[in-house]
Image (cartoon, rainbow, N blue to C red):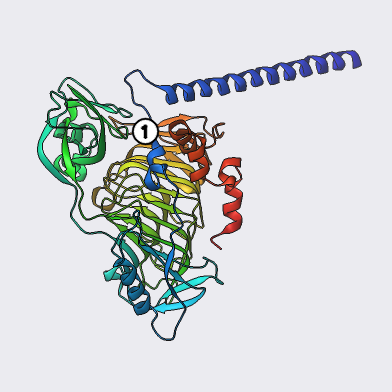
Amino acid sequence: MRKNISFFLIIFCLAIVGMTANSCKRERFSSELEQKKLERLLSLDDGQLQIPDFSFAGFERNEKAVPQVDVKVTLKPGSGDDGVRIQQAIDKVSAMPLVNGYRGAILLKAGTYQTAGQIVIAASGVILRGEGQSDSGTVVISTSKEPRARAFTFMKIIGGGQDIQEIGSPLEVAADSAVRVGATKIPVATTAGYNVGDTIVLVKTPNDAWINTIKMAEYGWTAAGYKMQHLRIVKRVDPTAIWIDIPVVDGIQKPWGGGYIAKASVPGRVFHSAIENMRLRSYYASDEDENHAWTAIQLSRATNCWVKNVTSQYFAFGCVGIYNQSDFNLVQDCAVLDPKSQPVGSRRYSFYIAGGMGNLIQRCYTRGGRHDFVTGARVTGPNVFLDGLATATFAETGPHHRWATGILFDNISGGQLRVTNRRETGTGQGWTGAQVMFWNCTASVDFGVFSPPTANNWGIGCIGSQQNGGGTYISPGHPVATRSIFISQLESRLGSAAVIRVTNDAQRDGTIAGKLANWEGN
């Protein structure tokens, strides 16, 4: 009997060993298969969809460092409303001459400032600077009790002018050609009148066939409503092709309407202005009070500007909103703490890109938001959210609605991370985004990557309790070895010096997630 038991134990153990070995083989095979998928995605060059080059997102396209601008005016907290004195100092520096693109900085010494009104920077090269974003640094309090309907913004960097203006006769994209995602060559019949250095727009002109293919007509989408301008610079001119500086983020195909190139003008923009090193705080009457300051900082028609080392506290909407063709701006080391408003629709968008391309939002933290790292309708990329942490969040991170393109969420952690078809939600929000990539992201609740017809979205190395959708998943549940695709692309394009210029030690050694969790905006 003992011999029989021993024999069966030996057979059982051998079977377990065999099963374990086979399991290991399958795991290794799966890992190798996922690696091959990833390598093919990153090197794809067979006319299929490529991933965008996101490395252009950032201040001055990451070709220059953010400067330390000399102080021209210094203020200390006074009695009563400090806002008038702060605005007078901004206006004084705004009237100074530009020297190498900058006028100067206004330094708010540490202490508490109170202001009922709005603070506005409307000139290039003006920096509003504090002495730290902690409670013991520079604290500027909005005492406004404006009603929610006014959606009061506390501080603005705002240019003038109009939307992108198209100039002259357009050049149609060649009828027999498709301009894929990742392309820099735009085939046209003739390039007469176009020169290297010209500012142009590549315009996608969808037709009803495209609207019907992506099944959005039933939600009120029209072809005319999705004519989208992608601002670019001409880098090379051939007899039948124009080469652009930033690769295409939304493909153009003749069956879906095609597109054209036109020269463009973007007058009135503000350049090289900034808000940095302070804590902004809003008055509030209760946890769901909405009659107070809505947004801490707004950028509008602003280019190569920055907001860094700013913590916003108790605002109803968010810390930084980027609007109206604001390009190549940097938001860095900023935080949203404890918004005061109802946790429902159209509220608590912590870091929000509503218009513009080339914007980089990195090393930011939120607590108590809804849509924490988010884009609006018809936003054209590349735009990047890098190394962000959202805690105690009420809704999802991702593109929010209506075909935002060329967005990277790189090492973002939150509750829900999604790119999806929202269908009739919010009067027809439909497909939220195309050419949207989540890279080594973590969702504590769930993950959803859905791809619309004619486009693609990706979830690479992402972790979530559930992973839903028919988008392109690679290495689900297991981060990939390349920690950040943005940093990898940046190094490939501009070298290691650019990586050092743009990122910090914690990003480069992979400890940034823990640092953000410990920092919490303080």
Q: Is residue 161 above or below residue 49?
A: below
Q: Is residue 43 above or below residue 363?
A: above
Percent x, y for residue 17? 74, 18
Classify residue 208 by image quadrant.
Answer: top left
Residue designated by label 1: 52
136 sits to left or right of 451: right
Query: Looking at the picture, which amino acid does disc 1 mark?
Result: Pro
Task: State the quadrant of the N terminus.
Answer: top right
Percent x, y for residue 283? 42, 76
382 sits to left or right of 221: right
> In the image, what residue occupies the spot 35% across and 17% down?
46
Number of numbered labels in the structure image: 1
Percent x, y for residue 262? 15, 37
Classify residue 146 by image quadrant.
Answer: bottom left
Classify residue 125 by image quadrant.
Answer: bottom left
Q: Secondary structure at mark 1?
A: loop
Q: Badge 1 local density, few (<14 within 10 Å), some, or many (20+)?
A: many
Pick the residue in front: 342 or 478.
478
> In the image, what residue occupies the spot 65% across and 21% down?
23
Task: State the quadrant of the C terminus.
Answer: bottom right
